[in-house]
Amino acid sequence: MQDIKMIRNVALFGHGKSGKTSLAEALLFTAGKINRLGKVDDGSSVMSYDPEEIQRKLTICSSFNNYNWKKHTTYLTDTPGDDNFINETKFAARVVDNAIFTIGAVLGVKFQTEKIAAYIQDAELPTIIFLNKMDRERANFEKVVDEIKYKLPQEPAVIYLPIGAEADFKGAIDIIKGTAYFFSGDGKIKEGPIPDDMQDDAEFALEQLMEQVAETDDELVEQFLEEGTIDKKDLINGLKKAVRTGKLAPVIPGSATLNFGTELLLNAIIEYLPSPADRPAQVGINPLTKDLVELPPLADAPFSGLVFKTTADPYAGQLTIFRVFSGTLSGDNFYNAKKDTTERFNQLFLMEGKEVRPIDEAVPGMIVALAKLKETGTGDTLCTKEKPVLYEGLDPIKPVMTFAVSPSKKDDEDKLFSSISKMLEEDPTLKLTRDQQTREILLSGVGQIHLQVLGDKIKRKFGVEMQLQAPKVPYKETIKGKARVQGKHKKQSGGRGQFADSWIEMEPLQRGGGFQFEDKIVGGVIPRQYIPAVEKGIIEAMEKGAIAGYPMVDVKVALVDGSFHAVDSSEMAFKISGSLAFKKAAQESSPILLEPIMNMSIYIPGDCVGDVIGDLNGRRGRVMGMDSQDNLEVVTAQVPMSEMLEYSPTLTSITGGRGTYSSEFSHYEEVPAQIAEKIIAAASKQE
């Protein structure tokens, strides 16, 4: 059984294009796991292998691998940095032990970096910062370290100073050991003396590091104040403790594509980051007693794990990926505490890029997969029936963009929706609904690229093409005035005729009042058995209103008078009579068009507030209030749905990708006359 102390579980985090996948490739190459250094740009990376990822040159799904370095085994997760796929990053932060935070030395801290830093902070992950792309033009180590210090919750502690920058970047100074390392393309380092012109910089950086470490420990503060220095052994131990408690994040400069600095990072992962056994135990609840359960991250504890990802494959079937938190999984079954069921499996797998390797058992710190499970899905807790535990589930990011979805070939409808259903299991940020009024199937996602990638995947995996269109707005109609009308249906064409005569009074109800029917017939002028037929005729007529064919709502109809024929009257005749009366009354009661209004919460940086509010005003929006949350301004507003169908790209443009929003239906309101005219004209043209 593997010694848990010799395991590390780390994930690579960072904004899009910061070089996470290239860094994963370099770590695997330097550690000897792979024998050639692949590149993201030419599609040869082992960690970025889906055709959609290769085509777009970005990480869409978290990918997994492992390597051995100095007798330690590290389980590595590469996460997406693009906003469309950030849910994968959020879920990964929930299950890994440590973070390698990749930040570009040219672009520095972007809004996306701040968002990902918050995920790392919320999950309390010990962190090493890899300052990547030091070889690029305009790379600036000091500037980016300052940005990290002032913009992110992580406190950067420089342990290596770069030697040179841009095209002259060639090595790093280990400020604790007082030596220099020079890089070569195979990832290896060569030790040498600190360049003369950097001696003062190295001494100053060591003093700063001592001060930072001392501030995290009372005993070290005393030593530093009394002696003006900290013993190197105490400094390293103090730094380890500060990293593991989240007080400091060591900074290492490098270049993933040149494979510079990766050996320093491989060493730092082992030296400074905790093993699963050194991390706090996961706390869950007993699903039966609701008592708190704490299972230690040890191989001989009761088994438990959390499913955080599911992938669908038309050939291999479904792969269920989970992190082992405690105990050892072996044998052929487990207990699913969320579904209250025992499930059997054939084989346990370790994921290595796009390959899977069969293994016999899994211990704490490992991320492993099972194939073709019937009951288990993302967010489920796996454990033993003897010691059941339920861990807190995973809360996916809410979708913000909705399209009407249809197959490009009508015959493919069933195939398309069964394919989307499989992808819903893989991606919990997707949502599939049906609008009862417009009869459209609606697909919601995090962004337009998110849904386009989904379409590419479905075409590749299941051979069916998906079309996306802007959804129809579910307008409704109502009335503002009152009317008293007659609906008379008389038909005579040989044999038994049809006769029904209904008088109704119609008036508006308050918004949201729906439909009310009142029977005011006295003296039997319409027999009892025909009155429900009148109501039914009215309800059917309401489905297509008076001005644009949209459903009519918020009306009260009273049946007040009428007449019948002993032979020619029937339920069908009175149903037609009710329908005729309603249509006539609707035309005479000042009909108007109603539109859905959405409640919106828009999260933006302070410098974008004016532009965002100006844009909302142009969309007929009403700003309801302002608040602050996590360094962002929150604008709450009510905006017509028709104005928000393509809001996501506009917000991205205004805020430079720093804004997000959520929306939900609020109520219906009257459409302004000039806009209503265009909608009515378009409806009559379509009709």
Image (cartoon, rainbow, N blue to C red):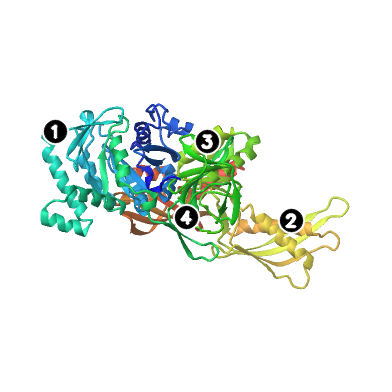
- Tell me which numbered mark, 2 or 1, is placed earlier along the sequence: 1
Local secondary structure at mark 1: loop
The residue wearing badge 1 is: 195
Q: Residues within 10 Å of mark 3 (few under 14, many from 20)?
A: some
Amino acid carrying mark 2 in the image: Ile
Residue 269 spot, x, y in % from top left: 32, 43
One can see residue 258 in this view: yes
- Tell me which numbered mark, 3 or 4, is placed earlier along the sequence: 4
Q: Report the Cα–Cα distance between label 2 and label 3.
A: 50 Å
The residue that appears at 28% across and 37% down in the rendered structure is 264
Q: Which mark is residue 457?
A: 3
Figure quadrant of residue 225: bottom left
Q: Report the Cα–Cα distance between label 2 and label 1.
A: 97 Å
Amino acid carrying mark 3 in the image: Lys
Amino acid carrying mark 1 in the image: Pro
The residue wearing badge 2 is: 576
